[in-house]
Amino acid sequence: MFYAFRGGSRGCKEFKFYDMELMKEKFSKLLLGEDMSGGGKGVSSALALSNAITNLAASVFGEMKRLEPMPAERKAKWRKEIGWLLSVTDHIVEFVPCKQVSKAGTNMEVMVTKQRSDLQMNIPALRKLDAMLIDCLDGLNDQSEFSYVSKDDESQEEKNSRKDDKWWIPTPKVPPNGLSDPMRKWLQFQKDSVNQVHKASMAINAQVLSEMEIPESYIESLPKNGRASLGDSIYKSITDEYFDPDYFFTTMDMSSEHKILDLKDRIEASVVIWKRKMHAKDGKSSWGSTISFEKREMFEERAELILLILKQRFPGIPQSKLDISKIQYNKDVGQAILESYSRIIESRAFTIMSRIEDVLQADAMAQNPSNGEVKRPLSDKEEEGKLNSAENGASMTLLDFIGWTPDQEDNNPKKDLKEDPTYKDINAKIKCSPPSIVTNKRFSYLENLGMCRSPTARH
């Protein structure tokens, strides 16, 4: 039996032995593709790694019902085991030319290996974003200004009980006069910082998903034209001569998470259909198009804009059929790690923002009891204000928070994130937004992918 806290060199050796055995178990499951029978019926290595990262995050972070520091044991477990899983990316390489000087003094060009460029750029960035979220929670170690209503405190429970969709989340309790100014400013700063982490991880995740191949099984399930996928009313709105995204969302029923997800599925399917029609090699193909290339391209751009707005306005909705299908059938191990790691960081950042907003709202109610409406973590006015202040240079950006310097030119994630079109769109393009609703699921990505099961088992 292993005893973790035994002293002396013997205890240290037993601890290292325990770590080694745990690592062997984890990587054995990855090699077996989650098929413990050894019969070769397991999932691909890419999906096994994706599920391992997802399940590890679910076991370490859980639902994060309170805004509090992570226990030291769980923090150590996360850093150790996520390090093991990410170590796979150190051995995913590509050949690049390199100049060398021979012993005779002649210059020659040879091919050498280096870590694949997408991993070299994004893994350090994601590690930094991950550390920023942990540091944000660690900053709460010495705070004593807010706490949470205990279930045994009947006098406070009825007074502070939630009347919104987050009824199962504990209610924050602040002093009668509210938080102190330093604490209020610190929480607001942390919220802004986590908001930047959320945007960056969301941009990386969207970029990775866009680069994944669309499975043939998904394509075969699609209708042969965009109208059949969208329905007559949505198709008419998107293909009308004058298209206004703001007006489009006012005509859509966005009253539930299911309806939002259904709209996303329909539009993503139509984008795939239109792209295939534009790239059809001949008119005899079943994917051939009777509409001009220019119009089809315009329809696709409109649909992509709607998807971008949906992603920004409703970050808590489950992943779409297309995303799940890509993750399920993806064979690229590097993309699988980037997608799953960025997804769990995005989900954690959104949850932390929600918990910070809960405390700030309790503070606002303590100062003004008549203000009893619970606000969403990213309201339209807040987002618009951040966009305006960013344009005026009045606020810090993600890259300022991360701390990269302008001197880092080669393989600089800061430079690439700034130039990434998805990142620019998320920060600047969204000016028109639909009526906001708060979805019930906070870890819907994890639930949708199955915390302990692969997507294969759910489809």
Image (spheres, rainbow, N blue to C red):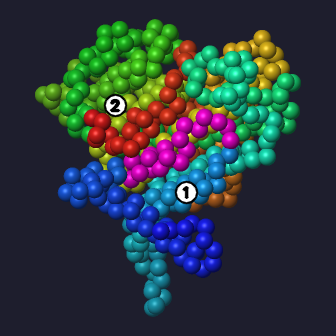
Count of residue discs? 2
**Residue farthest to the bottom?**
104
Among the two numbered marks 2 and 1 on one chain, the one whose residue lies closer to the N terminus? 1
Q: Work out how far the residue at label 2 is from the one at label 1, CA to CA, in angstroms.
A: 32 Å
Q: Which mark is residue 77?
A: 1
Figure check: 129 above or below 236 = below
Q: Label 1: how many residues lie within 10 Å, few (<14), some (14-19) or many (20+)?
A: few
Q: Main secondary structure of the magenta part?
A: helix
Residue 386 appears in the picture as rendered:
no
Tag 2 residue: 321
Q: From the viewer's perspective, tell me whether residue 197 is left or right of residue 328.
A: right
- Nearer to me, 294 or 134: 134
Q: Is residue 407 left or right of residue 341?
A: right
In the image, residue 58 lies in the stretch drawn in magenta? yes
Query: Of discs 2 and 1, which sits in the foreground?
Result: 1
Residue 86 seen by the camera? yes
Q: Secondary structure at mark 1?
A: helix
Q: Amino acid at mark 1?
A: Lys
Identify the residue shown where x is 51% and y is 23%.
439
Q: Residues within 10 Å of mark 2 (few under 14, many from 20)?
A: some
Q: Give the x, y percent position of residue 10.
A: 57, 78
Which span is picked out in magenta?
49-68
* Helix, strand or loop at mark 2: helix
Taking 15 as reference, is 278 left or right? left
